[in-house]
Amino acid sequence: MQNIHWETIYNAVGYVLKNYPLKIVLFCFLFLVLGLMISSFLVIILKKYKALSRSQKYYNWFVKLYIPAIFIVNIVFSLKIGLFCGVYSALKKDSYSISEQVYNSSTYYIFKDNRSKKVFIEDLRKVVKDLRQKNNNTKIKVIDIAKAYHIKNDMIDLPKNWMASMFVNRYGDKIYSFIIYGILDSVPNEGITNELSYGEFDAISEKLVVLNPENIEKSIVQKIQNLFLMILKSQFKTILKGILLIWVLLMCIPWFEFWIYTLLMKRLKDHNTIQK
């Protein structure tokens, strides 16, 4: 199960509430209506199977409290699910813009012109050369290139966009891996994988020199966006699974209690029959 970083989630909720309040209201309203419908259906089913009826007077009054309890629980959970789904939808919509902010803070100056691009490629070649001297393998992992480059060249500046800045702070290492992969993958017809030979790297670096910076930029932003969406989906999927599990357990309480009551009443009836 993916570990949930609650501070990041709460900050993301705050970010969306500030920038997309109407979207949150809409999602909460839709899920609230759905929750009320589910509550009504569950109460009808409970009544149909007489799970809300007891022979004892005060006990019978007590179990009737399940009706408002079901509605209250479903309202709370519906609003919570609506909130998280609204946040997920808003961040998904904003993902490319956030990824551009991350790009602008980390690699914009590398590819702002052809001269900067050539300086970066030479720097990258030095990193790979150092790795080659320390490694006897015939191939080199892209992630190792990213780590080595990251040590020598940290992020130039944090994004002005608060959400993008938090993303950089939290997942900086992974972002660099995707950036390096995006740069190498921007060369047409090369089919970059997680590993490449030193000869393949030399050939790719030669093509990067003459490649249009705009093509490189597009490839990088898309890779950053893919990482952002992957993390976003993983976090919110884990949260929703937890919420739904708790909801199911709470909705099972009336049935579990009714099952125990039915079992006890049956045993009491059998005992009285034997006594007679």
Image: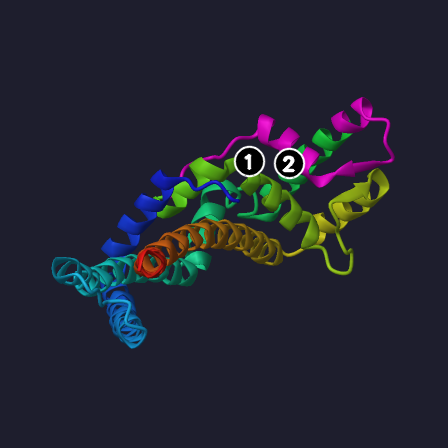
Residue 107 in view here: yes
Q: Residue at x 56, y 40 (%)?
A: 174
Task: Indicate whether residue 67 is drawn in magenta.
Answer: no
- What's the magenta region? 130-159
**Residue that badge 1 annotates:** 173
Question: What residue type is disc 1 on?
Answer: Asp
Residue located at (63% from left, 37% from top): 119
What residue sits right under mark 2 in the picture? Answer: 146
Q: How many marks?
A: 2
In front: 272, or 267? 272
- Up the image or down, 140 lies above or below 41; here it is above
Residue at the (29%, 57%) spot, across then down: 80
- Residue at 24% in and 69% down: 29
**Mark 1 crowd level (few <14, some 14–19, many ≥20, 10 Å Cα):** some
Q: Is residue 146 above or below residue 265?
A: above
Q: Secondary structure at mark 2?
A: helix
Label 2 with label 1: CB-CB less than 8 Å: yes
